[in-house]
């Protein structure tokens, strides 16, 4: 178990644009250093946003259509020549695999997390 991080303020949290998104496309990403997909997510913005995501323990077809929790305003990051625009949130499962975080019930695309 890792120790708690230093305390943040509510304003720190409020600056993050955390939303519900829907995975609309998953592409292979063989150039990534760690096994990853290129994942297109509809977060209720004017366009689909893309993420490099280490979710290869899931089949692409199982991800498409699923609701995920995303941070949309961390800024773009270049990963092996691909621009990753958002972070899909996840946690490590008991076996070390990445488990995608999502709502337990149906939630509208773009709905903010609070």
Image: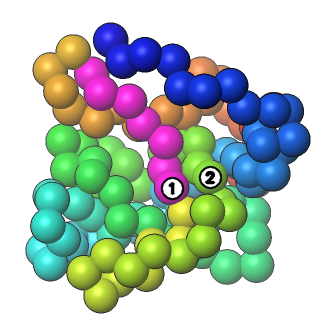
Residue at the disc numbered 2: 71
The residue sitting at 18% across, 71% down in the picture is 32
- Disc 2 to disc 1: CB gap under 8 Å: yes
Instruction: Report whether residue 80 is seen.
Output: yes
Residue at the disc numbered 1: 87
Q: Is residue 92 magenta?
A: yes
The residue sitting at 22% across, 60% down in the picture is 36
Quick one: SS at disc 1?
Answer: strand
Q: Position of residue 56 (x, y in %)?
A: 20, 50
Q: Nearer the viewer, residue 58 or 90?
A: 90
Magenta segment main secondary structure: strand
Q: Is residue 62 magenta?
A: no
Q: Is residue 79 above or below residue 105?
A: below
Number of numbered markers: 2
Q: Position of residue 51 (x, y in %)?
A: 44, 66
* Residue 95 placement: quadrant: top left
Q: Is residue 110 above or below residue 93?
A: below
Cα gap from disc 2 to disc 1, whole angstroms: 5 Å
Q: Position of residue 3 (x, y in %)?
A: 43, 16
The type of colouring in the image is: rainbow
Q: Is residue 81 above or below residue 108?
A: below
Residues shaded magenta = 87-93
Q: Quadrant of the C terminus?
A: top right
Instruction: Report whether residue 67 is seen.
Output: no
Q: Is residue 42 above or below residue 16?
A: below
Q: Position of residue 84 (x, y in %)?
A: 45, 73
């Amino acid at each position: 178990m890792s120790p708690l991080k230093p305390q943040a303020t509510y304003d720190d949290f409020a600056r993050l644009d955390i939303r519900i998104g829907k995975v609309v496309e998953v592409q292979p990403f063989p150039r990534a250093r760690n096994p990853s997909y290129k994942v297109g997510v509809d977060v209720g913005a004017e366009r689909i946003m893309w993420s490099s995501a280490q979710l290869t323990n899931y089949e692409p077809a199982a991800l498409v259509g699923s609701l995920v929790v995303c941070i949309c305003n961390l800024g773009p990051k270049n990963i092996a020549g691909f621009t990753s625009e958002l972070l899909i949130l996840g946690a490590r499962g008991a076996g070390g695999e990445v488990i995608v975080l999502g709502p337990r019930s149906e939630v509208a695309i773009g709905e903010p997390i609070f």
